Image (cartoon, helix red, strand yellow):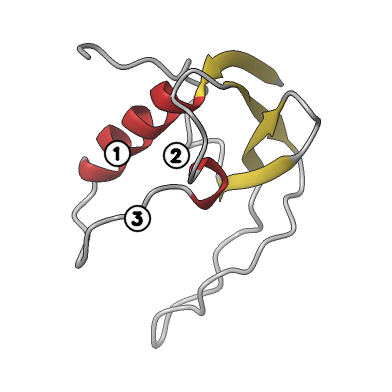
Amino acid sequence: MAAFDTTAGTLRRWHAVKASAVPQPVPVPEVQFLQGRPPSEPISACYFDGFIPAPMPPPSPGGTQMPEYDRGVFLVDTSGQEWMMLAGHKDTVPITRPVVDGP
């Protein structure tokens, strides 16, 4: 669907900004795939549309099961190692370039 070249440092800051926009009961930890990587390390953020096989939360009492995930965001390093950062839905996970204003 889309892919953006960026760095580990930008992805760390981007994830922190995006995560802080959603109320969380505890601070959101750093993305595991980025831990220990230098800020300047090249990483690609890739968006894929289609069935994304990922665990889904159970429905609320009396609720219905959510539809299957149909958009995934994957991180890929220069060696080809990949990690799924997010599974979600096209209507709630927009395709955005990982950029962050400021240092």
Q: Amino acid at mark 3?
A: Pro
Marks 2 and 3, how far apart at CA: 21 Å
Residue 18 x %, y % = 31, 36
- Estimate the x, y position of residue 97 in percent, counting from the top left: 48, 15
Q: Is residue 53 left or right of residue 16?
A: right
Mark 2 — residue?
92
**On screen, 4 above or below 83?**
above
Residue placed at 66% from the left, 58% from the top?
A: 68
For the residue labelled by badge 1, is the local secondary structure a helix, a strand or a loop? helix
Q: Is residue 2 above or below residue 91?
A: above
Indicate which disc residue 16 carries.
1
As measured in the structure, the alpha-carbon distance from the residue carrying label 3 to the one carrying label 1 is: 9 Å
Q: On the rendered structure, is 46 left or right of 64? A: right
Numbered disc in front, either 2 or 1:
1
**In this figure, which residue is indicated by the disc labeled 3?**
29
N-term mark: 2 or 1: 1
Q: Separation of disc 2 and disc 1 at Cα?
A: 18 Å
* Other residues around mark 3 within 10 Å, as few (<14) / some (14–19) / many (≥20): few
Structural crowding at the residue carrying mark 2, measured as other residues with C-alpha within 10 Å and reported as few (<14), some (14–19) or many (≥20): few
Residue 43 drawn at (x, y percent)? 61, 23
Label 2 sits on what residue type? Thr
Work out whether residue 49 or residue 91 is closer to the camera in this orientation and state it. Answer: 49
